[in-house]
Image (cartoon, rainbow, N blue to C red):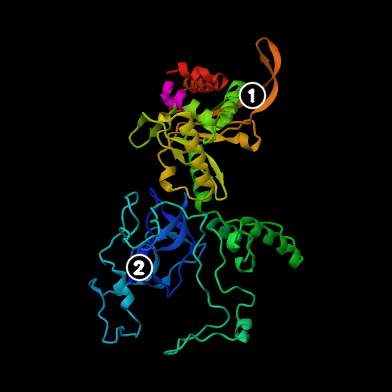
Amino acid sequence: MIREFPLPDLGEGLTESEVVAWRVAVGDRVELNQIVADVETAKAVVELPSPFAGVITALHAEPGQTVDVGAPLFSCDTGEDADGSPEAPDASGSDASGSDVSGAAAAGTDASETLREPGEPGVLGGPATPAETREPTLVGYGASAESGPRRRTRRAGVAAGPVPSGGAPRVPSPAGEAAGLGTRTAERPRSTPPVRKLARDLGVDLERVAGSGERGLITRADVEAAAAEAPAASGRIASETRIPIAGVRKHTAAAMVQSAFTAPHVTEFLTVDVTAAMDLVRSLREDRAFAAHRITPLALAAKAVCIAARRTPEVNSHWDEDAREIVRYAHVNLGIAAATERGLVVPNITGADRMTLTELADAITALAETARAGRTSPADMTGGTISITNVGVFGVDAGTPILNPGEAAILAIGQVRRQPWEFRGEIALREVMTLSLSFDHRLVDGEQGSRFLVDVATILRDPGRALTMS
Protein backbone atom coordinates (compact mmCIF):
# COMPACT_ATOMS: atom_id res chain seq x y z
CA MET A 1 0.00 0.00 0.00
CA ILE A 2 1.34 3.42 -0.97
CA ARG A 3 0.95 5.98 1.82
CA GLU A 4 1.65 9.69 1.52
CA PHE A 5 3.24 11.70 4.31
CA PRO A 6 1.83 15.26 4.36
CA LEU A 7 3.97 18.03 5.79
CA PRO A 8 2.76 18.60 9.40
CA ASP A 9 2.44 21.92 11.20
CA LEU A 10 5.80 22.04 13.01
CA GLY A 11 4.96 25.07 15.13
CA GLU A 12 2.08 27.25 16.21
CA GLY A 13 0.22 27.97 12.97
CA LEU A 14 3.20 27.72 10.59
CA THR A 15 1.90 27.44 7.03
CA GLU A 16 4.95 26.23 5.10
CA SER A 17 8.45 24.82 5.33
CA GLU A 18 11.44 24.68 3.00
CA VAL A 19 13.10 21.36 2.27
CA VAL A 20 16.75 21.78 3.25
CA ALA A 21 17.97 18.25 2.52
CA TRP A 22 16.75 14.70 2.07
CA ARG A 23 18.25 11.93 4.18
CA VAL A 24 16.75 9.24 1.92
CA ALA A 25 16.31 8.52 -1.79
CA VAL A 26 13.65 6.75 -3.84
CA GLY A 27 14.03 3.04 -3.28
CA ASP A 28 15.48 3.33 0.23
CA ARG A 29 13.90 1.33 3.04
CA VAL A 30 13.05 3.43 6.10
CA GLU A 31 12.15 2.35 9.60
CA LEU A 32 9.63 3.88 11.97
CA ASN A 33 10.91 7.25 13.29
CA GLN A 34 13.94 7.25 10.98
CA ILE A 35 14.89 10.80 9.98
CA VAL A 36 13.99 11.30 6.33
CA ALA A 37 14.47 15.05 5.78
CA ASP A 38 15.67 18.35 7.23
CA VAL A 39 13.16 21.17 6.71
CA GLU A 40 13.42 24.83 7.61
CA THR A 41 10.37 26.47 9.08
CA ALA A 42 9.95 30.15 9.74
CA LYS A 43 11.56 29.55 13.13
CA ALA A 44 14.01 26.64 13.03
CA VAL A 45 15.62 23.78 11.10
CA VAL A 46 13.68 20.64 12.01
CA GLU A 47 14.39 16.94 11.50
CA LEU A 48 11.38 15.03 10.17
CA PRO A 49 11.02 11.38 11.22
CA SER A 50 8.98 8.90 9.19
CA PRO A 51 5.65 7.92 10.80
CA PHE A 52 5.76 4.48 9.21
CA ALA A 53 8.18 1.86 7.87
CA GLY A 54 8.49 0.86 4.25
CA VAL A 55 10.16 1.70 0.95
CA ILE A 56 10.33 5.26 -0.38
CA THR A 57 8.49 5.44 -3.70
CA ALA A 58 8.51 9.19 -4.36
CA LEU A 59 9.93 12.46 -3.03
CA HIS A 60 7.52 15.27 -3.83
CA ALA A 61 9.88 18.23 -3.35
CA GLU A 62 13.46 19.16 -4.19
CA PRO A 63 15.93 20.71 -1.72
CA GLY A 64 15.26 24.45 -1.61
CA GLN A 65 11.60 24.04 -2.53
CA THR A 66 8.90 25.42 -0.21
CA VAL A 67 6.09 23.02 0.71
CA ASP A 68 2.74 24.04 2.21
CA VAL A 69 1.55 22.38 5.41
CA GLY A 70 -0.69 19.46 4.44
CA ALA A 71 0.90 18.99 1.01
CA PRO A 72 2.48 15.56 0.35
CA LEU A 73 6.17 15.44 1.18
CA PHE A 74 7.01 11.84 0.29
CA SER A 75 5.30 8.55 -0.52
CA CYS A 76 6.12 5.18 1.01
CA ASP A 77 5.15 1.60 0.23
CA THR A 78 4.37 0.18 3.66
CA GLY A 79 3.80 -3.39 2.44
CA GLU A 80 0.19 -3.36 3.68
CA ASP A 81 -3.16 -4.05 2.04
CA ALA A 82 -5.68 -1.25 1.78
CA ASP A 83 -7.34 -2.49 4.98
CA GLY A 84 -4.07 -2.09 6.89
CA SER A 85 -3.12 -5.80 7.09
CA PRO A 86 0.31 -6.94 5.86
CA GLU A 87 0.43 -8.21 2.29
CA ALA A 88 0.74 -12.00 2.23
CA PRO A 89 3.99 -13.24 0.66
CA ASP A 90 3.98 -16.27 -1.66
CA ALA A 91 5.70 -19.55 -0.87
CA SER A 92 9.06 -18.19 -1.92
CA GLY A 93 8.79 -15.31 0.54
CA SER A 94 8.38 -12.69 -2.19
CA ASP A 95 5.48 -10.51 -3.27
CA ALA A 96 3.97 -10.42 -6.73
CA SER A 97 6.77 -8.21 -8.04
CA GLY A 98 9.40 -10.62 -6.83
CA SER A 99 10.83 -8.39 -4.11
CA ASP A 100 11.54 -9.76 -0.64
CA VAL A 101 8.88 -8.58 1.85
CA SER A 102 10.30 -10.22 4.95
CA GLY A 103 11.74 -6.90 6.04
CA ALA A 104 8.26 -5.37 6.24
CA ALA A 105 7.15 -7.99 8.72
CA ALA A 106 10.34 -7.54 10.71
CA ALA A 107 9.65 -3.82 11.03
CA GLY A 108 6.72 -4.66 13.32
CA THR A 109 4.86 -1.43 12.63
CA ASP A 110 1.17 -0.92 13.16
CA ALA A 111 -0.72 0.59 10.22
CA SER A 112 -2.91 2.48 12.66
CA GLU A 113 0.06 4.57 13.86
CA THR A 114 -0.79 8.27 13.66
CA LEU A 115 1.14 11.50 14.09
CA ARG A 116 1.40 12.77 17.64
CA GLU A 117 0.36 16.30 18.29
CA PRO A 118 3.23 18.84 18.47
CA GLY A 119 4.50 19.21 22.02
CA GLU A 120 3.37 15.70 23.09
CA PRO A 121 6.21 13.60 24.55
CA GLY A 122 7.77 11.14 22.16
CA VAL A 123 8.44 11.27 18.45
CA LEU A 124 6.37 11.64 15.32
CA GLY A 125 4.59 8.40 14.56
CA GLY A 126 4.60 6.79 18.02
CA PRO A 127 7.04 5.52 20.63
CA ALA A 128 10.42 4.13 19.67
CA THR A 129 10.95 0.40 19.95
CA PRO A 130 13.18 -0.89 22.77
CA ALA A 131 15.75 -2.03 20.22
CA GLU A 132 16.34 1.50 19.00
CA THR A 133 19.50 3.14 20.29
CA ARG A 134 19.10 6.44 18.43
CA GLU A 135 17.81 9.23 20.62
CA PRO A 136 14.26 10.14 19.49
CA THR A 137 13.82 13.47 17.76
CA LEU A 138 11.20 15.64 19.38
CA VAL A 139 8.98 17.79 17.23
CA GLY A 140 10.57 21.20 16.73
CA TYR A 141 14.17 20.26 17.55
CA GLY A 142 16.68 21.21 14.90
CA ALA A 143 19.19 19.11 13.06
CA SER A 144 22.32 18.16 14.95
CA ALA A 145 25.22 20.30 13.82
CA GLU A 146 27.80 17.97 15.36
CA SER A 147 26.84 14.75 13.67
CA GLY A 148 25.89 16.20 10.32
CA PRO A 149 23.38 14.61 7.95
CA ARG A 150 23.55 10.95 7.11
CA ARG A 151 25.19 10.11 3.83
CA ARG A 152 23.65 8.05 1.07
CA THR A 153 25.40 6.51 -1.90
CA ARG A 154 24.69 8.04 -5.26
CA ARG A 155 24.96 6.39 -8.63
CA ALA A 156 28.16 7.58 -10.28
CA GLY A 157 28.44 7.60 -14.06
CA VAL A 158 25.95 5.27 -15.77
CA ALA A 159 23.35 3.30 -13.85
CA ALA A 160 24.58 0.13 -12.27
CA GLY A 161 21.75 -1.88 -13.80
CA PRO A 162 19.80 -4.81 -12.37
CA VAL A 163 21.35 -7.32 -10.02
CA PRO A 164 21.81 -10.74 -11.68
CA SER A 165 20.44 -13.68 -9.71
CA GLY A 166 23.11 -15.12 -7.47
CA GLY A 167 25.65 -12.52 -8.47
CA ALA A 168 27.01 -9.14 -7.43
CA PRO A 169 25.71 -5.87 -8.82
CA ARG A 170 27.13 -4.91 -12.19
CA VAL A 171 29.79 -2.22 -11.73
CA PRO A 172 29.93 0.62 -14.28
CA SER A 173 33.01 0.79 -16.41
CA PRO A 174 35.53 3.63 -16.16
CA ALA A 175 34.39 4.83 -19.56
CA GLY A 176 30.82 4.96 -18.30
CA GLU A 177 31.93 6.98 -15.28
CA ALA A 178 33.76 9.45 -17.48
CA ALA A 179 30.69 9.90 -19.59
CA GLY A 180 28.54 10.42 -16.49
CA LEU A 181 29.40 12.62 -13.52
CA GLY A 182 33.09 13.08 -14.22
CA THR A 183 34.84 14.18 -11.08
CA ARG A 184 31.77 13.93 -8.82
CA THR A 185 32.09 11.78 -5.76
CA ALA A 186 30.17 8.55 -5.23
CA GLU A 187 28.82 9.72 -1.89
CA ARG A 188 26.75 12.71 -0.96
CA PRO A 189 29.01 15.50 0.37
CA ARG A 190 28.91 15.82 4.16
CA SER A 191 27.73 19.21 5.38
CA THR A 192 25.15 20.77 7.69
CA PRO A 193 21.82 22.26 6.49
CA PRO A 194 22.93 25.91 6.95
CA VAL A 195 26.07 25.22 4.89
CA ARG A 196 24.04 23.58 2.11
CA LYS A 197 21.69 26.55 2.07
CA LEU A 198 24.65 28.93 1.83
CA ALA A 199 26.03 26.87 -1.07
CA ARG A 200 22.71 27.13 -2.92
CA ASP A 201 22.57 30.89 -2.34
CA LEU A 202 26.13 31.35 -3.65
CA GLY A 203 25.73 28.92 -6.53
CA VAL A 204 28.40 26.52 -5.24
CA ASP A 205 28.25 22.83 -6.18
CA LEU A 206 29.08 20.97 -2.95
CA GLU A 207 30.11 17.87 -4.90
CA ARG A 208 33.07 19.83 -6.23
CA VAL A 209 34.15 21.18 -2.83
CA ALA A 210 36.72 19.43 -0.64
CA GLY A 211 35.73 19.54 3.01
CA SER A 212 38.29 20.76 5.55
CA GLY A 213 36.28 19.73 8.60
CA GLU A 214 36.38 16.56 10.64
CA ARG A 215 36.00 13.46 8.44
CA GLY A 216 35.72 15.62 5.35
CA LEU A 217 32.82 17.78 6.61
CA ILE A 218 32.30 20.80 4.33
CA THR A 219 32.33 23.99 6.38
CA ARG A 220 31.02 27.49 5.76
CA ALA A 221 34.60 28.65 5.07
CA ASP A 222 34.99 25.96 2.39
CA VAL A 223 31.86 27.17 0.60
CA GLU A 224 32.87 30.83 0.80
CA ALA A 225 36.34 30.00 -0.54
CA ALA A 226 34.81 28.07 -3.45
CA ALA A 227 32.47 30.96 -4.20
CA ALA A 228 35.38 33.44 -4.18
CA GLU A 229 37.36 31.33 -6.65
CA ALA A 230 34.47 30.90 -9.09
CA PRO A 231 34.53 34.42 -10.64
CA ALA A 232 38.32 34.29 -11.05
CA ALA A 233 38.13 30.91 -12.76
CA SER A 234 35.54 32.10 -15.26
CA GLY A 235 37.13 35.49 -15.81
CA ARG A 236 33.92 37.26 -14.82
CA ILE A 237 33.03 39.28 -11.73
CA ALA A 238 29.46 39.01 -10.51
CA SER A 239 27.77 42.41 -10.25
CA GLU A 240 25.12 41.28 -7.81
CA THR A 241 24.06 38.39 -5.59
CA ARG A 242 20.45 37.33 -5.25
CA ILE A 243 19.43 35.59 -2.04
CA PRO A 244 16.00 33.92 -1.83
CA ILE A 245 13.81 35.22 0.99
CA ALA A 246 12.68 32.14 2.91
CA GLY A 247 12.62 30.46 6.29
CA VAL A 248 13.63 32.53 9.30
CA ARG A 249 14.53 35.60 7.22
CA LYS A 250 11.08 35.62 5.62
CA HIS A 251 9.32 35.20 8.98
CA THR A 252 11.45 37.88 10.66
CA ALA A 253 10.81 40.40 7.89
CA ALA A 254 7.04 39.87 8.03
CA ALA A 255 6.99 40.03 11.83
CA MET A 256 9.02 43.25 11.97
CA VAL A 257 6.84 44.96 9.36
CA GLN A 258 3.71 43.90 11.25
CA SER A 259 5.15 45.12 14.56
CA ALA A 260 6.37 48.45 13.17
CA PHE A 261 3.03 49.30 11.57
CA THR A 262 0.62 47.97 14.21
CA ALA A 263 2.25 48.97 17.51
CA PRO A 264 2.97 52.69 18.11
CA HIS A 265 6.67 52.60 19.04
CA VAL A 266 8.31 55.02 21.45
CA THR A 267 12.06 54.80 22.16
CA GLU A 268 13.87 56.37 25.11
CA PHE A 269 17.62 56.49 25.76
CA LEU A 270 19.62 56.67 28.96
CA THR A 271 23.41 56.56 29.37
CA VAL A 272 24.55 55.12 32.68
CA ASP A 273 27.83 54.68 34.56
CA VAL A 274 28.22 50.87 34.82
CA THR A 275 31.68 50.80 36.39
CA ALA A 276 30.37 49.12 39.54
CA ALA A 277 28.50 46.52 37.46
CA MET A 278 31.61 45.73 35.41
CA ASP A 279 33.66 45.42 38.60
CA LEU A 280 31.09 42.92 39.86
CA VAL A 281 31.26 40.93 36.61
CA ARG A 282 35.05 40.79 36.77
CA SER A 283 35.08 39.75 40.43
CA LEU A 284 32.58 36.95 39.81
CA ARG A 285 34.66 35.68 36.89
CA GLU A 286 37.73 35.50 39.13
CA ASP A 287 35.85 33.73 41.92
CA ARG A 288 36.34 29.95 41.74
CA ALA A 289 32.83 29.43 43.04
CA PHE A 290 31.54 30.90 39.77
CA ALA A 291 34.09 29.26 37.46
CA ALA A 292 31.44 27.08 35.82
CA HIS A 293 29.21 30.06 35.01
CA ARG A 294 29.72 32.69 32.32
CA ILE A 295 28.65 35.92 34.01
CA THR A 296 28.36 38.73 31.44
CA PRO A 297 26.99 42.29 31.33
CA LEU A 298 24.05 40.84 29.36
CA ALA A 299 23.25 38.46 32.22
CA LEU A 300 23.38 41.35 34.68
CA ALA A 301 21.11 43.46 32.44
CA ALA A 302 18.71 40.52 32.14
CA LYS A 303 18.49 40.25 35.91
CA ALA A 304 17.90 44.01 36.14
CA VAL A 305 15.05 43.78 33.59
CA CYS A 306 13.35 40.99 35.59
CA ILE A 307 13.56 43.01 38.81
CA ALA A 308 12.41 46.28 37.23
CA ALA A 309 9.47 44.55 35.47
CA ARG A 310 8.00 43.67 38.86
CA ARG A 311 7.82 47.37 39.74
CA THR A 312 6.40 48.36 36.34
CA PRO A 313 4.19 45.45 35.16
CA GLU A 314 2.94 47.47 32.19
CA VAL A 315 6.13 46.65 30.26
CA ASN A 316 5.48 42.93 30.75
CA SER A 317 2.08 42.78 29.07
CA HIS A 318 0.27 42.05 25.80
CA TRP A 319 -2.35 43.84 23.71
CA ASP A 320 -5.17 41.38 22.86
CA GLU A 321 -6.82 42.97 19.84
CA ASP A 322 -9.54 40.32 19.48
CA ALA A 323 -10.68 40.48 23.10
CA ARG A 324 -9.97 44.22 23.37
CA GLU A 325 -8.06 43.58 26.58
CA ILE A 326 -4.63 44.26 28.05
CA VAL A 327 -3.07 41.06 29.36
CA ARG A 328 -0.51 41.49 32.17
CA TYR A 329 1.73 38.54 32.89
CA ALA A 330 2.59 37.30 36.38
CA HIS A 331 5.83 35.80 35.06
CA VAL A 332 8.68 36.94 32.82
CA ASN A 333 9.58 34.88 29.76
CA LEU A 334 12.66 36.84 28.73
CA GLY A 335 13.44 36.92 25.01
CA ILE A 336 17.10 37.20 24.00
CA ALA A 337 17.71 38.32 20.42
CA ALA A 338 20.37 36.16 18.76
CA ALA A 339 22.05 36.71 15.39
CA THR A 340 22.56 33.42 13.53
CA GLU A 341 23.58 32.31 10.04
CA ARG A 342 19.89 31.91 9.25
CA GLY A 343 18.89 35.35 10.48
CA LEU A 344 17.68 36.94 13.71
CA VAL A 345 15.86 34.70 16.17
CA VAL A 346 14.43 35.62 19.57
CA PRO A 347 14.14 32.52 21.77
CA ASN A 348 13.01 33.14 25.33
CA ILE A 349 13.92 31.93 28.80
CA THR A 350 10.78 30.70 30.54
CA GLY A 351 10.38 31.92 34.12
CA ALA A 352 13.45 34.15 33.99
CA ASP A 353 12.15 36.21 36.92
CA ARG A 354 12.44 33.18 39.21
CA MET A 355 16.10 32.55 38.39
CA THR A 356 19.21 33.62 40.25
CA LEU A 357 21.92 35.55 38.43
CA THR A 358 23.99 32.40 37.83
CA GLU A 359 20.95 30.43 36.63
CA LEU A 360 20.08 33.26 34.27
CA ALA A 361 23.67 33.41 32.96
CA ASP A 362 23.66 29.64 32.32
CA ALA A 363 20.32 29.86 30.51
CA ILE A 364 21.57 32.69 28.27
CA THR A 365 24.73 30.73 27.41
CA ALA A 366 22.73 27.60 26.52
CA LEU A 367 20.23 29.65 24.52
CA ALA A 368 22.97 31.32 22.47
CA GLU A 369 24.79 28.05 21.74
CA THR A 370 21.56 26.36 20.64
CA ALA A 371 20.63 29.30 18.39
CA ARG A 372 24.06 29.42 16.72
CA ALA A 373 23.87 25.67 16.04
CA GLY A 374 20.47 26.14 14.37
CA ARG A 375 18.74 23.87 16.88
CA THR A 376 16.34 26.36 18.48
CA SER A 377 12.88 24.79 18.56
CA PRO A 378 9.75 26.70 17.49
CA ALA A 379 8.39 26.26 21.02
CA ASP A 380 11.37 28.18 22.44
CA MET A 381 10.49 31.17 20.26
CA THR A 382 6.87 31.50 21.36
CA GLY A 383 5.42 32.82 24.59
CA GLY A 384 7.95 35.60 25.23
CA THR A 385 6.75 38.55 27.33
CA ILE A 386 9.64 41.08 27.09
CA SER A 387 12.97 41.04 25.24
CA ILE A 388 16.58 42.22 25.31
CA THR A 389 18.89 42.76 22.33
CA ASN A 390 22.62 43.23 22.86
CA VAL A 391 23.83 45.58 20.12
CA GLY A 392 26.95 46.36 22.13
CA VAL A 393 28.64 43.14 20.95
CA PHE A 394 28.82 44.73 17.48
CA GLY A 395 30.47 47.90 18.79
CA VAL A 396 27.24 49.93 18.68
CA ASP A 397 26.30 52.45 21.38
CA ALA A 398 22.53 52.66 20.89
CA GLY A 399 19.64 52.00 18.53
CA THR A 400 15.86 51.98 18.20
CA PRO A 401 14.90 48.30 18.53
CA ILE A 402 11.63 47.08 17.01
CA LEU A 403 9.27 45.27 19.36
CA ASN A 404 9.02 41.52 19.14
CA PRO A 405 5.41 40.97 17.99
CA GLY A 406 3.03 40.52 20.91
CA GLU A 407 5.33 42.13 23.47
CA ALA A 408 5.13 45.57 25.09
CA ALA A 409 8.82 46.42 25.46
CA ILE A 410 12.33 45.60 24.27
CA LEU A 411 15.60 46.85 25.78
CA ALA A 412 18.77 47.32 23.72
CA ILE A 413 22.07 47.48 25.60
CA GLY A 414 25.00 49.21 23.94
CA GLN A 415 28.72 48.65 24.20
CA VAL A 416 30.58 49.43 27.41
CA ARG A 417 33.16 52.15 26.77
CA ARG A 418 35.60 54.08 28.96
CA GLN A 419 35.18 57.82 28.75
CA PRO A 420 35.42 60.95 30.90
CA TRP A 421 32.45 61.10 33.26
CA GLU A 422 31.39 63.16 36.27
CA PHE A 423 32.00 61.09 39.38
CA ARG A 424 31.72 62.41 42.94
CA GLY A 425 32.11 66.01 41.84
CA GLU A 426 35.15 65.34 39.65
CA ILE A 427 35.90 64.17 36.11
CA ALA A 428 37.17 60.59 35.92
CA LEU A 429 37.48 57.80 33.38
CA ARG A 430 34.44 55.60 33.91
CA GLU A 431 32.80 52.70 32.09
CA VAL A 432 29.48 53.78 30.61
CA MET A 433 26.70 52.14 28.62
CA THR A 434 23.67 53.50 26.74
CA LEU A 435 20.30 51.78 27.25
CA SER A 436 17.59 52.07 24.55
CA LEU A 437 14.04 51.12 25.49
CA SER A 438 11.31 50.78 22.86
CA PHE A 439 7.76 50.24 24.09
CA ASP A 440 4.21 50.01 22.78
CA HIS A 441 2.52 53.30 23.66
CA ARG A 442 -0.90 51.60 23.76
CA LEU A 443 0.24 49.63 26.78
CA VAL A 444 2.97 51.74 28.33
CA ASP A 445 2.77 55.44 29.03
CA GLY A 446 5.85 57.64 28.92
CA GLU A 447 5.94 57.86 32.71
CA GLN A 448 5.86 54.08 33.09
CA GLY A 449 8.47 53.47 30.38
CA SER A 450 10.75 56.08 31.91
CA ARG A 451 10.40 54.62 35.40
CA PHE A 452 11.24 51.14 34.14
CA LEU A 453 14.30 52.40 32.24
CA VAL A 454 15.56 54.33 35.27
CA ASP A 455 15.10 51.26 37.48
CA VAL A 456 17.22 49.14 35.12
CA ALA A 457 19.87 51.88 34.99
CA THR A 458 19.89 52.21 38.78
CA ILE A 459 20.58 48.50 39.22
CA LEU A 460 23.40 48.59 36.69
CA ARG A 461 24.86 51.75 38.24
CA ASP A 462 24.84 50.21 41.72
CA PRO A 463 24.15 46.42 41.66
CA GLY A 464 23.93 46.38 45.46
CA ARG A 465 20.73 48.42 45.29
CA ALA A 466 19.04 45.45 43.63
CA LEU A 467 18.82 43.87 47.09
CA THR A 468 16.66 46.76 48.29
CA MET A 469 14.25 46.85 45.32
CA SER A 470 10.94 45.01 45.60
Crowding around mark 2 (Cα neighbors within 10 Å: few <14, some 14 to 19, many 20+) is some
Q: What residue is at 59 percent from the left and 59 percent from the top?
A: 214
Q: Quarter of the image holding residue 72? A: bottom left
Q: Position of residue 368 (x, y in %)?
A: 52, 42
Q: Amino acid at mark 1?
A: Val
Residue ranking furthest to the top: 425
Relative side of 124 to 282, left or right: left
The quadrant of the picture occupied by the C terminus is top left
| Disc number lying in front (2 or 1) | 1
The secondary structure that most of the magenta stretch takes on is helix
For residue 200, which numbered disc appears in the image? none
Q: Is residue 307 part of the magenta span, yes or no?
A: yes
Q: Amino acid at mark 2?
A: Glu
Residue 440 visible to an observer of this rendering: no
Q: Position of residue 435 (x, y in %)?
A: 58, 27
Report the residue marked by disc 2: 4
Does 386 sit above or below residue 104? above
Q: Position of residue 405 (x, y in %)?
A: 46, 38
Q: What residue is at 62 percent from the left and 36 percent from the top?
A: 393
Circle nearer the N terminus (2, 1): 2
Residue 432 visible to an observer of this rendering: yes
Report the residue marked by disc 1: 432
The quadrant of the picture occupied by the N terminus is bottom left
Q: For the magenta stretch, what is the residue range?
A: 306-314
Crowding around mark 1 (Cα neighbors within 10 Å: few <14, some 14 to 19, many 20+) is many
Helix, strand or loop at mark 1: strand
